[in-house]
Image: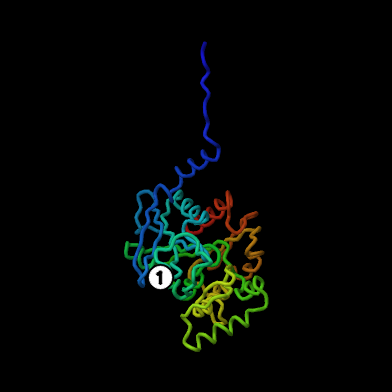
Amino acid sequence: MIRKTKTVKPPFLLVLLALWLAGNPTTSMAEEVTQQFNGLTLNANLVLADGQSPKDPIALILHGIMGHDGMEIIQSMQRALFDNDYSSLAFNLSLGLDNRKGFFQCDTPHQHTVQGALTEIQAWVDWLKDQGASEIILMAHSRSEALVYTALQADPAISNLVVLAPAIYPLIDRFKDRYGNIYDETLARMELATSKGQGQELIEGVDFFYCPQATVMPETWLSYYGKNSTYQDLASHIPNLPVKTLIIFGTEDEVIVDGHESVKPLVDNETIFMFVVDGAGHFFRDFNIDEAMEAAIEFIS
């Protein structure tokens, strides 16, 4: 009797995972790089396209607020760039932590500032320049400091800016939507502490971004939410961007609702360009990131 051999097939999701890992440069071709900066170890994920070095055009990618370089959208951006012969460096802001990886947790004291983030962006630009880079495409997702950096102090090596789903709403408005009418009270509390020389002392029970009742330095809170913060209204920086900029939105963005309608009056198709992905949410999942990155790559090419 001939016994039929039963073929055991691996679970479908495991097959998909194996295929993804095999074709994902962030796992198979990536190299972690670090540098020492202001007493902290900064880390980043470097993916070099075949036959290239940092001397070739390279994208410098920044995550959104409290995010990290291992997020799905950041890895997808690096993979799309790699598939189109572009190298990339996705870096983590330290947010005051040594060798930070993964999401910034709400129970971690907030001891970071916008200015600190801007200096770390410059540190990675300088690192790339030290490797021989002369053309750097800055890319970012959501509420990052990339718009502020580019508008206020962009290095001449920055050739283009591409931002996906930038958080162009006023930050104070979002604070009030999330925490109610306590902005003025919290502002006065942080300003009073700073005036007493306590700006770098930790205060408990402070609402901060998506972290209610967090432990925060007054200088940290004011750098993001203060009336004179350069981070408070990212849209205000768009007219001042000195490099050609592509802003990409999704029509179904649940975080930046109708962002494309708000930015439309600022688009001049000379310096400021916009591309809209129909049906995409804030994180451009599945095929939406392919469409977004296809537009980005065409733009920077």
Choose top left, top right, bottom left or bottom right for residue 11: top right
Choose top left, top right, bottom left or bottom right for residue 281: bottom right
- Residue 244 drawn at (x, y percent): 50, 66
State whether residue 116 is above or below residue 193.
above
Residue in the foreground of this view, choosing between 261 and 192: 192
State whether residue 87 is above or below residue 198.
above
* Element marked by disc 1: helix
Q: Amino acid at mark 1?
A: Gln
Q: Is residue 11 left or right of residue 251?
A: left
- Residue drawn at (65%, 61%), measured in percent from left and top? 254
* Residue at the limit of the structure toward the bottom, as seen here: 196
- Residue drawn at (36%, 73%), measured in percent from left and top? 38
Residue in the foreground of this view, choosing between 7 and 150: 7
Choose top left, top right, bottom left or bottom right for residue 53: bottom left
Residue in the foreground of this view, choosing between 276 and 127: 127
- Name the image colouring: rainbow
- Residue 141 drawn at (x, y percent): 53, 62
- Residue 290 drawn at (x, y percent): 55, 51
Residue in the foreground of this view, choosing between 147 and 174: 174
- Residue 266 drawn at (x, y percent): 60, 70
* Residue at the limit of the structure toward the front, as seen here: 204
Find disc 1 in the rendering and name its residue: 122
